[in-house]
Image (tube, rainbow, N blue to C red):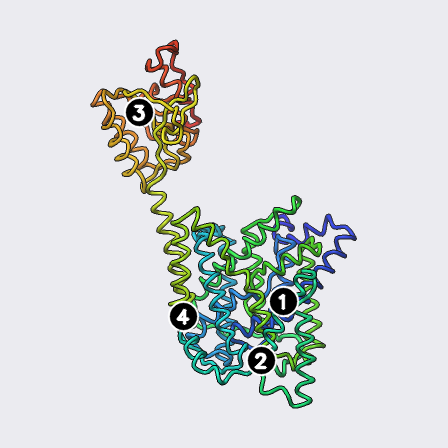
Amino acid sequence: MKIKRWLPLYGTLKTYYAKDWRKDVLAGIVVAVMIIPQGMAYALLAGIPPIYGLYAGLIPLIIYGIFGTSGQLAIGPVAISSILLLAGVSQLADPMTSEYISLIILTGLLVGIFQAALGLFRLGFLVNFISQPVITGFTGAAAVIIFISQIRNVTGIPVPRFSYLYETVYYSFHHLLEMNRMALLFCVTSILALWILKKINRALPGALIVVVIGIIVAWWLSKSGQLAGMRVVGEIPDGLPSFILPELSIENALLLIPTVITVGVMGVVECIGIAKTIQRRHEESRIRPDMELIALGLSKIGGSFFQSLPTSGSFSRSAINDEAGAKSGLSSITTGLVVGLTLLFFTKLFYYLPNAVLAAIIIFAIRNLFDYKEMQRLWKSHKTDFVMMAVTFVVTLIFGIEKGVLVGVALSLAVFIYRSSRPHLAVLGRLPNSQAYRNVERFEDAHCPEDVLIMRLDYQLYFANVIFFQDAIQNISKTKKNLRLIILDAAGIHAIDSTGIRVLRELFFYFKKRNIHFVISGSIGPVRDKMASSGTIEEMGAQSFFLEIHDAMIYFGVLPEQAKTTWSADAVQTNYEEED
C-alpha cells in the first residue's frame, strides 16, 4: 500500500521546494487572520458560544492538511453549515445550553462518519443527484434566513427563537422601539468598512481590521459609560480545547439523522465544488474525490473530540488561500497552528468585541449566496430548472431549511427521472450531396424519402424510457406511406439494459410482420456486446446492423445514384465471447 495514497501531504512534500514552504506558511497565516473573526461569528450563527468557532479552526484544519488532496481548499466554520445546524439541532434543545452544545458536537462526529463512509465506499457520486438549480434556490433562501437570524444582533432587539421565518420578522417589526441604535450603528458601519476594504484590496484582512477597530471603540465606549446596553462577546476561555468524548447515545443519534444527512451532503457539495473549481487553475494538482471525502470526514471526527463546531469548505477563504500561493495541506496546518496560538495567548482581547460586528461579518460573507444572476439566467434559458430553483427557494423560506433541502432533492430526482424517461428522439434526413444525416426540424434541407424513416435516440435505452421510445417509433411510422425501411441511429445510445434489448427485438419482429426492415446503425461496442450476449444479433440477423446510416441506405437501394454495396461484417464486430 503506497503511503502517499492515504497521506497526500507526504506525497506532496516529496517534491517540495523551499519557496513552496514560504508560500504555504504565508497563505496559512493570511487564512488564519480571516478564520478567527469568522469562526466566532459562525459559532454565534450556529447558536453556540464563539469559542467553539475558534476550536473549529484548530484540529480539523491540521487533520485535513494531512489527508486532504487539495492544497488550496480552506475548511473551517461556514455560514451554510452553521444555519443548517441551528435549524436542525434547535428542534431538540435550546441554543447556548449545554445540552444543545453537546448535540452540536455529536452532530459533527456523525457527519464526519457519514462523509468518511461515502469516501471509503466510493459513494460520493450520490451527491450529484442534487442539481445546481436546487442548490441555487437553497443557498439563496439560506442567505435570507441567515440575514433575518441576525436581526437580534444587528438591532439589539431580544428576538425569541421561532420555528418559522415570518414569526421572527413579525416580532421584530412590532418591537422596533426596543432597537439598540448603537448596535445598529456598529453593524452598518462595519459592513461599509468591509465593503470599502474589499474594493481597495481583496487580500486585505477586512474582517480582522473591523474586529480590531470594533473592540477598541467598544472598549472606549464602555470606559465612558456610553456602550448603551450593546451586547459584546464577553469572557472567552483561553487555552487549547480539552480532549472530551462526544456524548453519544442511540436515541440522540437517531433524532439527528436528518440534520446529519443534510449537513453532510451540503458539505460535500460545497467542498468538492470549491476544490474542483480551484483545481482548474492548477494543472499539477489532481483532486481525488473519494479521498477528499475521507479527509473531510476525519477532520470532523477528530474535531468532535476537541469540541469543534462542524466544519466545511469556505469559498472566500479558499480563494484567498489560492491567491496567497498555497501549494499543499501545509497551509491548512499553518492556519490551525496560528489559531492555536490565538487560543493560548489572545482570547482575552476579544472581550469587548460587539455581537453587532460579528453580525456584520456574517451578513457581508453571505452576500454572494443570493445568486440573482444565476436566477436570471435560468429564467431566460431553462424554465424547468428555474421552477425547481424557485420551489426550493420558497419551500425553504416558508417551511425551513431541512424541508427545503428535502423538497429540493425530491425535485432533482423527479426531474431526472422525467427527463430520462422522455429522452430526445429525432427524425433524421440526408443533407443534399452528402453522407450527413441531421434532424429534419433543425435543418430545412435535410430530406428523407417517404418510404424510409430514420430516427436517432440521444440517451441510454433502459427500462424507464422504453415505453416512450417504442410508442414514439410506432406512432411516427404510421405517418409514413408505403414505409419499407426504418433505420435507428444508435450512435447516441451509450448504454442499454435487458429491457431495452427486449424492446429492440419486439420492434424488429413487429415491423417484420408488416414487411418493413428495422435495422440499426452506429451502435457502440459495449451496446453490441450486450446484444450479442443476449442473442439479439443472432435473432435479428447480422445484416440488420450497419456502421453508418448511409451504408444502410445504399444496401437497401434507397439511393439509386449509388452503387449497391456488399454488407460488411465489421458492422457487428464485438469483443463478446460466448461462455462455454
- Say which quarter of the image contains residue 312: bottom right
Q: Is 146 rendered above or below residue 490? A: below
Residue 440, given in percent of the width and then of the height, sits at 36, 28
Which tag is nearer the camera, tag 2 or tag 4? 2
Q: Amino acid at mark 4?
A: Leu
SS for dot 1: helix
Task: Please name the residue shown 69% across and 75% down the image.
Answer: 212
Residue linked to disc 2: 183
Q: Amino acid at mark 3?
A: Leu
Q: Amino acid at mark 1?
A: Ile
Q: Earlier in the sequence, mark 3 or mark 4?
A: 4
Residue linked to disc 3: 453
Distance between the alpha carbons at the discs numbered 2 and 4:
37 Å
Residue 388, given in percent of the width and then of the height, sits at 39, 54
Q: Earlier in the sequence, mark 4 or mark 1?
A: 1
Residue 255 badge? 4
Q: Earlier in the sequence, mark 1 or mark 2?
A: 1
Q: Earlier in the sequence, mark 3 or mark 1?
A: 1
Distance between the alpha carbons at the discs numbered 3 and 4:
58 Å
Residue linked to disc 1: 59
Residue 162, given in percent of the width and then of the height, sits at 42, 77
> How many numbered tags mark residues here?
4
